[in-house]
Amino acid sequence: MKTLSINHIAPVSLWSITRNYIAICKAKVVLMLVITAWVGIALAPETERTWFAQIMSLIGIGSLAAAAAAINHVVDREIDQKMARTRHRPVATERLSVRHALVFACVLTVAGISVLLVWSNVLCTILTFMALLGYAVVYTLFLKRATPQNIVIGGLAGAMPPLLGWVSETGQLDAEPLLLVMIIFAWTPPHFWALAIARRNDYKRANVPMLPVTHGIEFTQICMIVYTVVLALICVVPYLISMSGWFYLVCSSILNIWFIIKSLSLYFWPSDEKAMALFRFSISHLLLLFIALFADKWIV
Ligand code: HEM
Ligand SMILES: CC(C)=CCC/C(C)=C/CC/C(C)=C/COP(=O)(O)OP(=O)(O)O
């Protein structure tokens, strides 16, 4: 592989430099956010917009989400150094400097805003930028360090993409995409707390007030069950208002009952392995739920 020599000391491959930049984007999370934004576009009322404009809108939303993730790596570098799960991250290990990470985040932000202004609209651009600030500043800089409700409130930023996709199409706010936001909003606490239970010692060591650290595992598991039930109830509403049909209702009901059963099982027979399995399940759950929302539009 081709190598670059920095100060003739450590040969660093071009790929390992690129890999650092990809890592600070949280690429898999951003991909999932873009998929939910795409469903927002697909469910919006039909417009004259071209495929190209829709793809550019998704690229713009993805760029701002990746910029937010890069800023998160900078702001959280000292916390990340203390946690086994995150201590190998590029900024935490200083493989990537703070300056380089911030310049990268700025480039992504400017590029994302420009793309959205050209191929989307002003409202979508403002809302997407607000989501960036919500995650990179409000959640990361303040809430994460301040309250065990950090991820509940901060979760709103990550829940925004279906609304952003919808608004990129229509240029206005509507009730339907807000419902999609509420679905992700209710999904986020069981998604994250499952991981936080398994990694509670990490958070304790880093002095981050996550719910399993401040209120214990049992209380967190009860909260997770409550949120999975709330999620199941919210997921019925798209069917009730005829936004989605029976195919979506059947799929979402199966997924949500499964989510509730898994949360109950974690409560009655707790283990870290089961908590991690529930965390991984939550990701498949959301992906399948949004695929069901999308497929329903064509099936029914
Ligand atoms: C405040 C809200 C959220 C918090 C605190 C949170 C937290 C986390 C954490 C700590 C991880 C593990 C990352 C790692 O192993 O490095 C993770 C993974 C993941 N999250 Fe979330 N999450 C949130 C919202 C979301 C949202 C809204 C989505 C998508 C719509 C999402 C999708 C994912 C995916 C796909 C992964 C797996 C990434 C991988 O395998 O590398 N998360 N989340
Ligand atoms: C513009 C736009 C749509 C923004 C979306 C923002 C975004 C990337 C949300 C994802 C949320 C997320 C991965 C939280 C991780 O929490 P954490 O940072 O506490 O986890 P960590 O310990 O793994 O860093």
Image: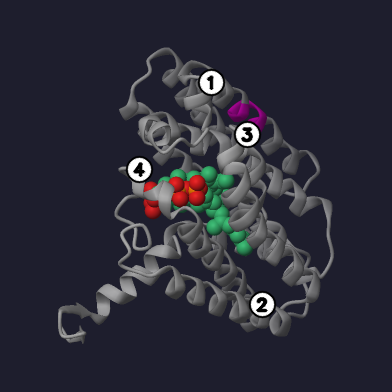
Q: Which mark is on residue 12? A: none
Q: At which x and y percent is residue 31?
A: 48, 62
Check disc 3 and give the amino acid type.
Gln
**Pointer 3 and pointer 2: residues touching (CB < 8 Å)?**
no
Rendered view: 123 above or below 208: below
Per the rendered image, the range of residues in magenta is 227-232
Which residue was labeled with disc 3? 149
Name the residue rendered at 50%, 30% in the picture: 259
Q: Amino acid at mark 2?
A: Ile
Q: Nearer the viewer, mark 3 or mark 2?
A: 3
Residue 180: where, in percent of width, then height?
69, 49
> Dot 3, crowdedness within 10 Å: few (<14), some or many (≥20)?
some
Specify the farthest residue to the top. Answer: 268
Residue at screen point 50% across, 38% down:
191
Q: Amino acid at mark 1?
A: His
Q: What type of secondary structure mainly makes up the magenta span?
A: helix
Residue at the disc numbered 4? 83
In primary-sequence order, the first of circles 3 and 2 is 2
What whole-number distance in Å separates the C-alpha atoms at marks 4 and 1? 20 Å
